[in-house]
């Protein structure tokens, strides 16, 4: 029944064809395009999800440990995953959110448990412009898949910041400093932070630091797509 509903929504949104190739599809993507998604499978740093030798902590995380404890990423931010992420975020193709959320859920360790699932908050201004928070739409699938509590109200984006994508990599940490605030004490809580794309990790680092100052014991990132390692890594 759920499959039928998802299929009907996809048909409405995409005229019944695969979102990527317009070929015959039962869901959002045809089987061939789904199989072509750039799923991350190789050994990766457990903390930041960048490729690493034998799955050891990478040099960057050793040299400058981020505030978050772990990262799970499902896809490389490469074609066609980038088309899907941008279709959701910038064209409001909400039917893509369950597809991306389910790809991420499939990558989680078996029986993954957290106290709260927190989508990276948008500022009120950005939320009004866009009309939805793509991270929240993705997080709904993760809450459904894990049975963990979706808690988008745990933190707020208290300050409007220029989009990270417009800034050079080395200015992104400064850009997001002080951007978030917690709305409640998080006594020893374990929190999974959900986002669509992780690039430098500056936004996720700042949010994890904010959550830990509010008492969180452990913060893990669940992100759909990870950009390739920066050139200076
Ligand atoms: Zn296709
Ligand atoms: Zn790392």
Image (spheres, grey):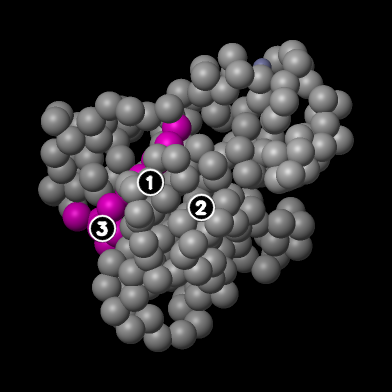
Side of 52 where 184 appears, left or right: right
Is the residue 226 above or below the residue 194 in the image? above
Q: Which of the two residues, 201 or 98, is positioned nearer the viewer here?
A: 98
Please identify, in this view, whether the residue under mark 2 or under mark 3 is nearer the observer: 2
Judge whether residue 93 can be spotted in this image.
no
| Residue 16 x/y as whole percent | 82, 25
Side of 89 where 149 appears, left or right: left
Is the residue 75 above or below the residue 223 in the image? above
CA–CA distance in space, label 3 to label 1? 15 Å
Part of the protein shown in magenta: 65-75
**Crowding at mark 2 (Cα within 10 Å: few <14, some 14-19, many 20+):** some
Q: Tell me the tag on residue 108.
A: 1
CA–CA distance in space, label 2 to label 3? 22 Å
Compare marks 2 and 3 and give the one earlier in the sequence. 3
Which residue is painted at 82% across and 37% down in the image? 8
Side of 17 where 230 appears, left or right: left
Q: Tell me the tag on residue 145.
A: 2
Q: Residue furthest front?
A: 1
Which residue is painted at 53% across and 59% down in the image? 143
Q: Tell me the tag on residue 69.
A: 3
**Crowding at mark 3 (Cα within 10 Å: few <14, some 14-19, many 20+):** some
Is the residue 98 above or below the residue 220 in the image? above
| Residue 44 x/y as whole percent | 25, 35
Please identify, in this view, whether the residue under mark 3 or under mark 1 is nearer the observer: 1
| Residue 66 x/y as whole percent | 25, 56
Compare marks 2 and 1 and give the one earlier in the sequence. 1
Q: Quadrant of the C terminus?
A: top left
Say if disc 3 is inside 8 Å of ligand 2: no
């Amino acid at each position: 029944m759920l499959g039928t509903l998802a299929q009907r929504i996809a048909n409405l949104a995409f005229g019944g064809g695969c979102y990527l190739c317009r070929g015959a599809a039962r869901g959002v993507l045809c089987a061939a395009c789904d199989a072509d998604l750039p799923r991350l499978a190789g050994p990766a740093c457990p903390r930041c999800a960048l490729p690493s030798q034998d799955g050891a902590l990478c040099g960057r995380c050793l040299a400058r440990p981020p505030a978050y404890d772990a990262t799970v990423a499902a896809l490389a931010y490469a074609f066609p995953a980038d088309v899907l992420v941008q279709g959701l975020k910038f064209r409001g193709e909400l039917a893509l959110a369950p597809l991306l959320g389910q790809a991420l859920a499939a990558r989680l360790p078996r029986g993954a448990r957290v106290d709260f699932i927190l989508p990276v908050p948008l500022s009120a201004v950005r939320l009004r412009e866009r009309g939805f928070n793509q991270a929240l739409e993705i997080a709904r699938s993760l809450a459904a898949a894990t049975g963990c509590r979706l808690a988008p109200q745990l933190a707020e984006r208290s300050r409007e910041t220029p989009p990270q994508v417009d800034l050079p990599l080395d200015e992104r940490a400064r850009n997001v400093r002080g951007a978030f605030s917690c709305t409640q004490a998080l006594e020893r809580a374990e929190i999974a932070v959900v986002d669509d794309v992780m690039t430098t990790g500056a936004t996720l680092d700042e949010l994890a630091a904010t959550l830990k100052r509010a008492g969180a014991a452990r913060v893990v990132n669940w992100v759909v797509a990870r950009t390739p390692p920066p050139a200076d890594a």
